[in-house]
Image: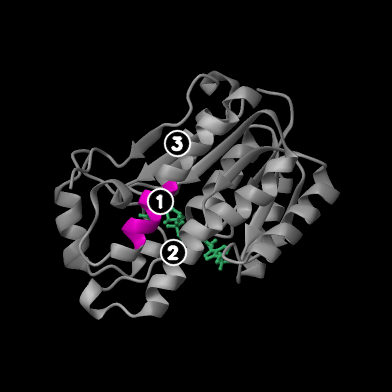
Amino acid sequence: MQNRRVALVTGASRGIGKAIAIELAKNNADIAVNYYKDEKEAAGVVEEIKKLGVDSIAVKADVSKFEECSSMMDAVKKKFGYLDILVNNAGAISDRTLKNMDKGQWDLVVRTNLDGIFNVTKNALPLIRENGRIINISSIVGISGNHGQTNYAASKAGVIGFTKSLARELGKQKVTVNAIAPGFIETYMTKGMPFIRKKIIMAMVPLGRPGMPEDVANLVVFLASDKAGYITGDVIRVDGGLNF
Ligand code: NAP
């Protein structure tokens, strides 16, 4: 168990972000729970976290908007004063082949997943203390690409480039910056996927089961810990061995 730290998890009202927020709280961190639309779910996550004996607030911000991220950091600073752990998890999909994709679909995904990482991290930097941790949730799609996901793949590959570059910039402050590339994880995001496509993907997973949000959260807890102090600029897959 480490000394109490402060974490901000974006997109923590459900899915992977919620699991990350709760697992970090179980490991003695106060948590700022960022959400975009679902105030009720975010409030529920805050309550769940408080029952674990740590402090928590919900902070609304659309990560694709720089000014909203700036206000979010003001709220975090007012409540906690500083940050030790930043988890850039908020993300969106809007799948279509490039032929059928409209500009709005491109913009939604790239502005949320890639501009969002800039908007949040840039505003968070002044609050991050020495030995801090920045953990960015990319995707195996950012490594391998995927049919119907040019927008998503481009944004998630961008997250990897951002991670590796920032790791070089922040090494002197002993702040580590890493990315996690999940495979198929059961959440709202993957719920709408056609059954047949899920079946095809599952056939390619050696471990024979879909990933759970906690599978990703467990790695975040490790990367956020003192034990991971010599790991930076890396991209770690959590995909059950799924190989596109
Ligand atoms: P999810 O269940 O759809 O949850 C998405 C979360 O992001 C929600 O909390 C949502 O908040 C928030 N969000 C969306 N747009 C936002 C915005 N503009 N500003 C702030 N928050 C926003 O998705 P998930 O599966 O947990 O995915 C979490 C991350 O993992 C994403 O980056 C995703 O790309 C990545 N990932 C997921 C999988 C998978 O198989 N599920 C695989 C690889 C990578 P509200 O509900 O409040 O709007």
> Nearest the camera: 65 or 244?
65
* Residue hosting label 2: 110
Residue 20 image point, x, y percent = 54, 44
Residue closer to the observer: 209 or 125: 125
Colouring chosen for the image of the structure? one colour
Q: Which mark is residue 158?
A: 1
Q: Amino acid at mark 3?
A: Lys
- Binning the other alpha carbons within 10 Å of mark 2 as few (below 14), some (14 to 19) or many (20 upward) gives many
Count of picture labels = 3
Q: What span is colored magenta in the figure? A: 152-159
Q: Nearer the viewer, residue 37 or 159?
A: 159
Specify whether 166 is left or right of 195: right
The N terminus appears in which quarter of the rendering?
top right
Disc 3 target residue: 164
Determine contact: label 1, label 2, CB under 8 Å. Answer: yes
Q: Is residue 157 magenta?
A: yes
